[in-house]
Image (tube, rainbow, N blue to C red):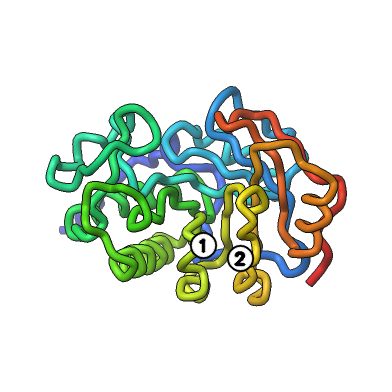
Amino acid sequence: MLLVLLVPAVSGCVPQWARPVAIPPWPAGPTPTWQWQLRGEFDPNVDAEVFVLDAFRTPVEDIRRLRERDRRAVCYVNVGTYEPDRPDAERFPETVLGAAAYTEGDRWLDIRQWSVLEPVLADRFRLCYGKGFTAVMPANMDGYARESGFPLTFDDQLVFNRRLAALARSAKLSPGLTNDLEQVVALEPSFDFAVNEQCFQRAECDQLLPFVEARKPVFQVEYDELADETCVAAQGYGFATIRKEPDLGPWRDLCLTAPPAR
């Protein structure tokens, strides 16, 4: 007797585009223009080629609108600190929570406990991929250099960050390195792009040269007014430099000159 199993189609939870079977390469040439927005009403009409958006707060519809316009969506995921307002916050046991971090209630994570953190971070990366993001920007990747409450070492951070890059690739996401300038030389081969905050203000942009020399995009943000000399220097480095308010809402200012082709 032949049994036929009828499975009803489920369309409501499937995005209306084909997920990539491989990680899309970053385009050759100058670093794409970009926008970083984590707060406020999303503005899809910002003149940018790359949008960094929050993994949890961004609905699938916003990603769909970007992809219809051939824009690249990068998923912002906090990997180094605990945030109590995230929907998966209860998955972090007290044993991995350290000293207070930047925002009230946030705490540094013990990145040495990979067996505890990996399942949570893997699910976050899967969420990114499921929503249609094609890359991930992990945040707070330099806990070893902070007062984390744990005796984290330089090597602990290298191991953790390389594991993050591999985890992202396993989820078919292009991994980016956020800040962590002291480890750029060692980590550049593992990451496809870099995101930096305030290297001009802190006079440390030269530490990002390994990404530039490898022809990988460097997305850079300052929180003070963009002086002409800053924009000239950004163009010389080949960075895509913007100015944002610290709350990372929709407002953005940018240098008027585009980075040169490499």
Q: Residue furthest top?
A: 41
Q: Amino acid at mark 1?
A: Leu
- One can see residue 103 in this view: yes
Q: Residue at (46%, 31%) from the top-left corner?
A: 57
User: Crowding at label 1, few (<14), some or many (≥20) Cα neighbours within 10 Å?
Assistant: some
Q: Are the residues tagged 2 and 1 within 8 Å (C-beta)?
A: yes
Residue 244 percent location from the top left of the image: 65, 36
Q: Which residue is mark 1?
A: 181
Q: Quadrant of residue 236?
A: bottom right
Residue 201 percent location from the top left of the image: 65, 48
Answer left or right for 6 relative to 166. left
Answer left or right for 226 relative to 256. left
Look at the picture and state if 218 lies above or below 100: below
Q: Earlier in the sequence, mark 2 or mark 1?
A: 1
Answer left or right for 30 relative to 141. right
Q: Which residue is mark 2?
A: 208
Look at the picture and state if 189 lies above or below 234: below
The numbered dot on residue 25 is none
Whole-number angstrom distance, CA of label 2 to CA of label 1: 7 Å
Quadrant location, the C terminus: bottom right
Element type where label 2 sits in the image:
helix
Q: Residue at (39%, 52%) from the top-left corner?
A: 125
Quadrant location, the N terminus: bottom left
Q: Quadrant of residue 249?
A: top right
Q: Residue furthest front?
A: 203
